[in-house]
Image (tube, rainbow, N blue to C red):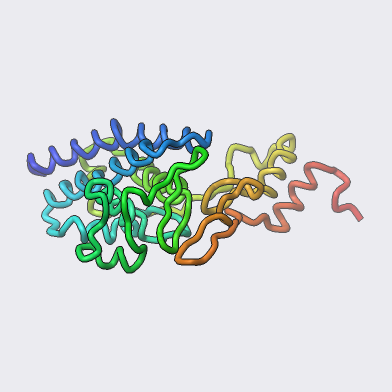
Amino acid sequence: MNEKLEIACADFRHYVTQILEPAKDDLEEKVRKGDVSLYQAFGANLILAHSVDYLQAVRSATGIDETRTALIQMFDEKFSIAGAYLGNRKMELIDAINNALKHIRIDPKRYRNLGERYGQISFQSLVEQDGYVWCHLEEHRFDYCRVVLLPALRALSSWQFDSTEDVLHFARGDFLVMETSFYPDEYDPDDPSTAIDQMIELCNPPCRNCELHADDCLCTRYVFAGERGQYEPAYTPTASEINELMSHISPSYGRS
């Protein structure tokens, strides 16, 4: 652990706790209220794009020799930015939108792969409409905050960086990502008094992609590579779960 590495790790921790985490909390609240402004989305996007630079500084100080472009290309998979849509492409798009804001339009000759995948990307690709910020590309249309920004912000702010060693392990990718469940765990499964609440939660799962319930799901308005999105329940109750809850709700349930 040399001085350069110590400084890089401290910088990364400060950036995450003092800048990225507050940005995530603020954007989550605004998305929940349906009150996101275009400049706020661009601000969160810029913060995420620059987080790559802080992470690369740590990796470079450990002796990892790579370009920023190479790190971005493997960022989503290595650092676990989840989501069914745009799998392993979220940070790439975040960086592209940030460059488009800076240069007005992405140079298709410089970013050939991006152009082939998304078409022309400019600062006008993000559009504010009725409290949402939509991303409009040639064959893509979706809520940019829900599909791209929030998953990326959560992926970077969900870790406990209590020490330099914690940052070092994260930067190297020395960790296991445990799949998280959407199913709420605030209820005691052995408490019959919560059975009705549990049944309501179990039978009304949020969408795996936009985290909204079926009646409010926006995914049918999304388009990805020319194909329309759809509501995908985050979990499906099993027969045994239903039977157990029904036996708590009604003592006569299941009796012959």
* Residue 17 horizontal/vertical position (percent): 30, 33
Image quadrant where residue 114 sits: bottom left
Image quadrant in which the C terminus is located: bottom right
| Residue appearing at x 32%, y 56% in the figure | 121
Image quadrant where residue 231 sits: bottom right
| Residue appearing at x 69%, y 42% in the figure | 198
Towards the viewer: 256 or 19? 19
5 on left or right of 83 = left
188 on left or right of 175 = right
Res 40 seen here: yes
Examine the rendered structure and indicate whether residue 216 appears above or below residue 34: below
Examine the rendered structure and indicate whether residue 82 appears above or below residue 154: below
Towards the viewer: 168 or 111? 111
Task: Report the label total.
Answer: 0
Image quadrant where residue 165 sits: top left
Res 169 seen here: no
| Residue appearing at x 32%, y 48% in the figure | 123
* Residue 175 horizontal/vertical position (percent): 32, 53
* Residue 28 horizontal/vertical position (percent): 45, 37
* Residue 118 horizontal/vertical position (percent): 36, 63
238 on left or right of 149 = right
Image quadrant in which the N terminus is located: top left
110 on left or right of 95 = left
